[in-house]
Image (spheres, rainbow, N blue to C red):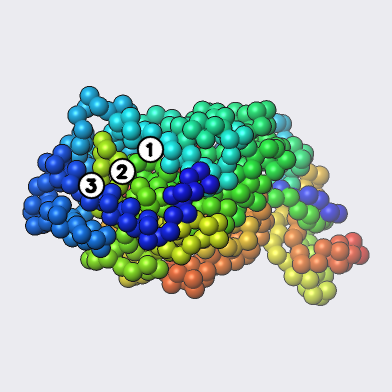
């Protein structure tokens, strides 16, 4: 399933994550999934949130650089070898390149969730839906 | 033109007038200012030695340090009782430079500012929103008196309170904005954030000065504010704004040579350089009475072109200030000015003109660090594309300026916005 992801540019300094999370908390926005990519000077925070538009507004008001884009959120059984057989192998076979992904345990027992950014969203969606 | 009889004067005649005024002024300072008399005597030159304009090079230079050493009134040629106005520079180090004017000076200056505004494209029906700082700074009152002399309506809003500035532009129908170029950009940005399209207001011209800025910055201001941005030049030691100004052809700033004698010298040796060559601008005031200055080293790097302009003015044109000799950075032996770095940054698509150059205390460096703000337009969720951006900026600095730069991407609005002159180079220990 496709979902909206919110990315934020964050300076690599103590306390910046607090500055970023606070406006979201104040607006009662829930973070469903999150990952941080880091370089020497900055990080890119990527999130799937309960209210994308609200999050973008709150972050803009707090003067962050923000970007919204579409990613794939794929729910799968939380079992050994699941990620390998249900995600990695099918995508590799189809020749789809992963830009990045993050995974987390799902809200339902026995389920896990992967958020994927790929070079070909449509094809990846088809491949994963086929199982 | 405000005074075509001077602005279009044939150069031969102009030079005759300049020589006459120079001879008078040299004699005047020799008699009235002990500082100049002592300096002339030290150099072995007397007013009688000035027989041609070229003889000006026989006179000693005056520097900012001379103003400091004779602080506050030591360089004055008239008693304080004759002074009607005092301005001072925003001295960042030590004592400020104090400039004094008698009634005649204020009259001359107001007239030159009216000439400057007309050259920028203004007329008596204009509404000038003067966002230069009022007070000790020459910019505020300089533009104010010039605008009034011209017969325009002047809104003395001074700098700062950006949202109110935009409200006034909309509500009062300001046609001319006078402010520093960096503040013009802040205004344009803020207007955009407020949902105000400046291009649909009455605003026509931005009269920008008081700091060096690049052609790319001009393009940025013109695009974002929907105006013609005109460069205006001046300095406190010489008079304030109104030394030179562009005309709508934007082919250099016409120096009001009937009042200021301009030379270009080698910044290191002080030797005179021919027209067309880049060097340090040196100015002598030809008509000022309270605080005349002889051969003032401006530290501004420019070219001079004496050919008649398309606008018909014969007054020599100086290029935009290419840099300041005291702002000059030496990176592995390459001389670099902040304005050049700005130019390169602005040539890269979507990169904002908000940057800061971080240097170590001594200005001879192996490389420099340039901080560039990440806007929504350049930000990406992919690390690779941000790294590519850093790489592109680095490569451009290398290929255009021949310097190696470390690029650091920083969050939006982390670089201090200035409502007056932007401070582009900062020392690491100030961080």
Of residues B417 and B322, the one nearer the viewer is: B322
- Check contact, mark 2 vs mark 1: CB within 8 A: yes
Q: Alpha carbon of mark 2 to alpha carbon of mark 1: how far? A: 8 Å
| Quarter of the view holding residue B197 | top right
SS for dot 3: helix
Residue annotated with mark 1: B108
SS for dot 2: loop
Task: Report the residue at 48% width, 62% height from top.
Answer: B308
Task: Report the residue at 54% width, 43% height from top.
Answer: B118
**Residue B174 higher or lower than B321, as above or below:** above
Q: State which tag comes first along the sequence, 2 or 1.
A: 1
Q: Nearer the viewer, mark 3 or mark 1?
A: 3
Image quadrant containing the C terminus of chain A: bottom right
SS for dot 1: helix
Chain at numbered mark 2? B
- For mark 2, does the 10 Å Cα neighbourhood hold few (<14), some (14 to 19), or many (20 or more) residues? many
């Amino acid at each position: 399933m496709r979902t909206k992801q919110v990315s934020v540019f964050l300076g690599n300094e103590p306390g910046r994550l607090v500055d970023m999370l606070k406006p979201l908390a104040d607006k009662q926005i829930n973070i469903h999934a999150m990952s941080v990519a880091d370089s020497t000077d900055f990080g890119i925070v990527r999130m799937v949130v309960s209210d994308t538009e609200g999050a973008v507004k709150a972050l803009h008001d707090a003067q962050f650089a923000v970007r919204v884009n579409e990613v794939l959120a794929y729910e799968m059984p939380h079992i050994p070898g699941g990620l390998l057989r249900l995600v990695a192998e099918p995508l590799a076979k189809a020749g789809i390149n992963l830009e990045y992904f993050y995974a987390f345990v799902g809200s339902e027992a026995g389920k896990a969730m992967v958020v994927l950014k790929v070079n070909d969203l449509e094809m990846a969606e088809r491949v994963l839906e086929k199982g | 033109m405000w005074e075509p009889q001077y602005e279009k004067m044939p150069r031969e005649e102009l030079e005759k007038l300049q020589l006459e005024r120079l001879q008078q002024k040299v004699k005047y300072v020799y008699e009235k200012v002990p500082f100049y008399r002592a300096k002339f005597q030290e150099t072995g030159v007397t007013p009688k030695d000035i027989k041609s304009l070229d003889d000006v090079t026989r006179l000693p230079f005056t520097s900012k340090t001379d103003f400091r050493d004779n602080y506050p009134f030591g360089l004055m040629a008239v008693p304080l009782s004759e002074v009607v106005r005092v301005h001072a520079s925003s001295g960042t180090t030590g004592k400020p430079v104090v400039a004094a004017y008698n009634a005649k000076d204020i009259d001359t200056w107001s007239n030159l500012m009216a000439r400057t505004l007309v050259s920028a494209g203004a007329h008596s029906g204009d509404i000038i929103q003067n966002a230069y700082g009022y007070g000790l700074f020459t910019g505020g009152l300089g533009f104010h008196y010039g605008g009034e002399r011209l017969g325009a309506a002047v809104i003395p809003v001074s700098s700062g309170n950006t949202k109110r500035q935009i409200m006034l532009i909309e509500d009062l129908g300001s046609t001319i904005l006078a402010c520093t170029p960096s503040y013009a950009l802040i205004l344009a940005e803020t207007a955009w954030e407020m949902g105000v399209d400046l291009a649909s207001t009455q605003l026509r011209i931005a009269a920008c000065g008081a700091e060096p800025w690049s052609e790319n910055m001009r393009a940025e201001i013109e695009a974002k504010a929907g105006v013609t941005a005109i460069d205006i030049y001046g300095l406190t030691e010489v008079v304030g704004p109104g030394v030179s100004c562009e005309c709508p052809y934007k082919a250099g700033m016409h120096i009001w040579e009937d009042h200021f004698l301009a030379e270009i010298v080698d910044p290191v040796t002080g030797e005179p350089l021919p027209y067309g060559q880049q060097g340090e601008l040196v100015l002598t005031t030809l008509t000022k009475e309270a605080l005349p200055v002889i051969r003032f080293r401006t530290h501004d790097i420019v070219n001079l072109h004496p050919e008649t302009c398309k606008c018909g003015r014969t007054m020599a044109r100086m290029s935009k200030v290419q840099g300041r000799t005291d702002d000059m950075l030496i990176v592995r032996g390459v001389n670099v000015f902040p304005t050049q770095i700005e130019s390169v940054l602005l040539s890269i698509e979507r990169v904002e003109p908000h940057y800061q150059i971080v240097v170590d205390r001594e200005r001879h460096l192996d490389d420099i660090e340039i901080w560039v703000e990440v806007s929504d337009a350049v930000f990406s969720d992919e690390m690779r594309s941000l790294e590519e951006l850093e790489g592109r900026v680095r490569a451009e600095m290398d290929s255009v300026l021949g310097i190696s730069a470390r690029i650091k991407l920083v969050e939006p609005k982390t670089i201090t916005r200035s409502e007056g002159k932007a401070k582009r180079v900062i020392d690491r220990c100030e961080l």
